Each structure stands twice: as structure tokens, then as C-alpha cells.
Amino acid sequence: MRSFDFDAESVAATAELRARFAPDATWPIEPGSILDEEYVARLGQHDIVYSWGVLHHTGDLWRALAFVAGLVKPGGLLFVSVYNDQGLQSRLWRRVKRSYNLTGRVGRTAIVLLSAGYLWRWQPLLRMIRWFRGGQPPRARGMSVRHDLIDWVGGYPFEVAKPETVFDFLRDRGFELQHLKTCAGGLGCNEYVFRAPPQLT
């Protein structure tokens, strides 16, 4: 197992996770960028490569995806999730995210509050329908609602892709789609599992 991230706080958080739950594990955790070709070349190839919801924040999604694909051993698996392309709505969210990262504290607070009002406008109705049907509340994420919202609004660079575009990109490199879970055309990520082409003889 090996982990790397461009963000120093993410590296520290992963190291803390290792210290708490796998202190004896041989698990290298280090700073690194998927867009650093020399660094990526030193990583070798692996049976399983997992990049969940980060390549679309690199500023160069397709170059990053190509480098990630190169890390998978022949016959190995690639797990990846990429923001769904919603057309105009995705372009508007890109502007919101860019504005959030360019403004000061007051501006950021206003953007977060306005985004919350837009994103949660249907929540009371959806909760009532779920209660009426006897359903369970949605499973909580690992972060607070506040941090989840800031994570969404502040996530920039922000790139998106249609499922067929990701599929075509990796198919052209010999990968076969094993599993796909879409966000039904909505906001969020489409999730993929691809198998790398077998070793040529």
C-alpha cells in the first residue's frame, strides 16, 4: 500500500489514520502530485489504484487520469470517481467556486450561505417524503455538514466529465469497464471501476 497527496494537510491526516489504526503497517504516506511526471514514474505499477474524487481538482483532469492509468499493473483494477458534467449548471458552479477562492472572508461567508440555500432548498420536502415512506435518514458523511458544504463550494480547480467521455478515454488505453455508478445526471460524482489490459505476450 502507498498513499500520496498534493495537499500537506491530507498527507498529515492519512498519517494520523495510519498511526491510530495500523501503527505496524508498512504504508508509505508522502507528499506528491499526480501531475509531476518524474514523481509518478518512480511509483511503479500496482494491482489496485484508487483515486476517489481528486483528479477533477488537479487543474488538468485528463493528464492526471492518463498518469493514474499508467500506475495500474496489467490486469489490475482502477477505481476512480469524477464529477458529473451537467452542462450549464457545472459551468455556473465553476464560477461560484472560483469566486469563493478569489474573495475574502465576508465574500466567502456570503457565497457559502447562498449556496446552502440553493443546495438544500428541497430538503424539508424530501425529509417529509422519506419519513412518510418509513425510510431511514441518509447515512452521514465523515465530515460535518458545515465542512461538507465548504468542501463543495471551495473545491477549485473544478473539472467535470460525462460518463461516456471517461469510458472512451480509458477504453482507448485498453481498459475495460467493470462497474459504473452514476449520479443519475445530477450533482456529484460518477464512480467507475476499470480493469487494465492484460500483459501482452
Image: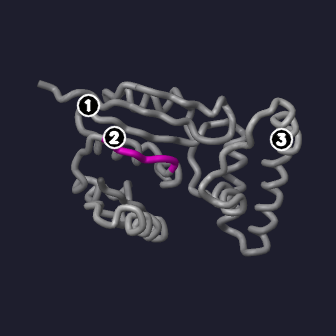
Q: Which residues are magenta?
A: 48-53
Of callouts 3 and 1, the N-terminal one: 1
Q: Is residue 79 magenta?
A: no
Q: Nearer the viewer, residue 97 or 15?
A: 15
Could you tell me which residue is drawn at 66 percent across and 31 percent down?
Answer: 185
Name the residue that disc number 2 marks. Answer: 69
Q: Is residue 163 above or below residue 62?
A: above
Q: Residues within 10 Å of mark 3 (few under 14, many from 20)?
A: some
Q: Which mark is residue 75?
A: 1
Could you tell me which residue is drawn at 42 percent across and 67 percent down?
Answer: 20
Mark 3 or mark 2, which is nearer to you?
3
Kind of residue indicated by mark 1: Gly
Mark 3 or mark 1, which is nearer to you?
3
Name the residue that disc number 3 marks. Answer: 127
Of callouts 1 and 2, the N-terminal one: 2
- The x, y position of residue 14, in whole percent, is 43, 64
Q: Which mark is residue 112?
A: none
Q: Residue furthest front?
A: 134
